[in-house]
Structures are given as structure tokens and as C-alpha cells.
Amino acid sequence: MNIRKIKNIYKSKPVIDGAGVQLKRAFGYYEKPLFDPFLLMDDFRSSDPEKYKNGFPFHPHRGIETITYILKGSVEHQDSMGNKGIISTGDVQWMTAGSGIVHQEMPQVNKSKKLEGFQIWVNLPSSHKMMAPRYQDIKAKDIPEIKINDGVKIKIICGSINQVKGPVENIIINPSFFDITIDSNIKYAHAAKIEDTVFIYVIKGEVHFSENGNSDYLYKDSLLKNETLVLFDKGENIIMHAGKKGARLLYLSGKPLREPIVWKGPIVMNTEDEIRTAFEEYNNGSFVK
């Protein structure tokens, strides 16, 4: 069994983005070569509306895709093409900005005051940077959940496990996105695509990732907890052992692009000239195609 070893471990760090939203960033601009084709991951779980209510007013994107996954609460979105809607508990929005879109994402304050969700940015290859923008809005009821033996449940957002496919389809980097729940002291071996970039973000409980398949994992200092991200080296399998509290994990993988990345704010292209053109078009009103 070719087990993937841990390459790096990251702890999410507080940042302020949008119109003053306080969130945690798992990785971003400075780690981009390591996570190719992924660019950024934000964790915006909060029970204090003052930290999130101002949201993300209208701003442009070009050259990327954004994935928004809501665990609790809701976010209203609206864009320059006239699209408008609500992403609510359990829903996913996979937005392909492509050639350019101007949109806003505004959190809604409900009675519980809780908003829990994540956003991941995914790079597009040079051949698709200027593709037509599109949305895949996925409701919670349309995301299949499977059981792997006793003690492991997986929501399949994108990709497939045991011939069960997620509802997000036709994504250029052929990614996988799973929401994995593992019961207390349960071991789970997941088969990963051997050449993919793979990372896991812990969102609940505690977990250990074995590099040899053994089960002697319940040493306190080896358990990784909430707001911890693990980036893996190449390989075929990832061995997960949940601790006494069980674990909930977000699993993402995708095919590396291995292309130049020039990134300025919400625009990610391959050259400085492309970045310059994007902002000139945004300023003169020709950004949206």
C-alpha cells in the first residue's frame, strides 16, 4: 500500500476580507505553488454577526473558480449577469468566473446568529481562463451521502466513490470534494488519485493520519483538531484514524496545472499583461464579456 505522507501542516490564521469580514484563512497567496491547482481556502464560521454581516460587496473575478460550501446559515449572491439567489445550510455553489464576472456575497443574519461555511478558490488553466462564466448551484438534498462500513459517512460534492458521483460535474481540473465524518476511534483508508494535489481540512473533532497503516495513533500530540489543514505528498492512499471525539473533515483533490500564476486581488492570470488588461477592462466597463 503506497500511503501518502504528510507534506505540511497548517493552522488557520485570522484575516479580514471583504467589507470587514473576520474569518480564518487556511492557505492563500503565499502557499500557492504548493497547493496547485488550489489557490485559497477561507473558513468563515462565526456566531457573532458583527464579524460577518458586512459581507463581500460587488467585486470582480477572472481566471478562477470559487467554491462556497455552507454548513449553517445562508448567503445571498447576486451578479452582473442578473443571477441572484440564496446559498443555505448544506448547499454548494461552484462558480466559474472564467472571462469575468462581478458579484457580491452577502451573509444573512438569522435567529441563531450563526454562519458557518467555507470558500475555496481554484485556478483555471490558461486554455480556459477566458471561458464563459457559469454557476453550478447545488442544494443539500441533491448531495449524495454514502456509508463506508460502520462509522464512516461521506457526502460526495464532486468526484466519485464506489461509483457514486457528486452533482458538481465538468470541472476542468477533475477535482474531488468530500465531506467526511468518521466516528470515534474508527480507521478509514481512502484511495486518492496518485498524481493529484490532496489536502484535508479538519472542521470538527480530532484525527491522526498514519504514514505506515498502524493503529497506535491515540497519542495526544499526534491528533490534529479543528482549523488544521494537512497537505499530503504524492501517493495512492490516505489513512485516517479518528480520535475519541470522532472527526469531520473536508477532503479536496485536483490535478496540478503547473502553469505560471500572476495574482492580484480577485484576478488570477498567467502573465502581468493579462492582469493589466483585466483591470483596465474593469475600469472602462468592458470587463464582463
Image (cartoon, rainbow, N blue to C red):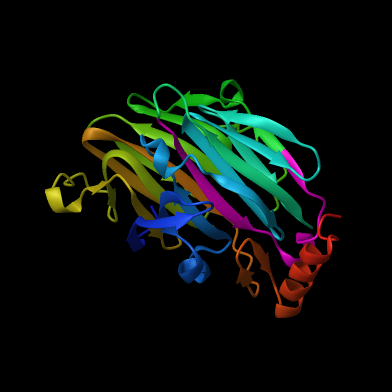
- 47 on left or right of 54: left
Between 35 and 212, the one nearer to me in the picture: 35
Is residue 261 visible in this depiction of the protein?
yes
Residue at position x 76%, y 61% in the image: 129
Where residue 99 appears, as percent x and y from the top left, is 79, 58
Farthest residue to the bottom: give it. Answer: 272
Where residue 133 appears, as percent x and y from the top left, is 78, 48
What segment carries the magenta color?
A: 114-135
Image label count? 0
Residue at position x 71%, y 63% in the image: 125
Between 229 and 265, the one nearer to me in the picture: 265
Res 131 → quadrant: bottom right
Is residue 195 visible in this depiction of the protein?
no
In this view, 110 is above or below 219: above
Between 19 and 65, the one nearer to me in the picture: 19
Residue at position x 77%, y 63% in the image: 282
* Quarter of the rendering occupied by the C terminus: bottom right
Between 66 and 81, the one nearer to me in the picture: 81
In this view, 199 is above or below 139: below
- 112 on left or right of 270: left
- 101 on left or right of 30: right
Where residue 7 appears, as percent x and y from the top left, is 37, 64
Where residue 143 appears, as percent x and y from the top left, is 57, 27
Is residue 128 in the magenta section? Answer: yes
Is residue 130 in the magenta section? Answer: yes
Residue at position x 41%, y 50% in the image: 22
In this view, 226 is above or below 199: above
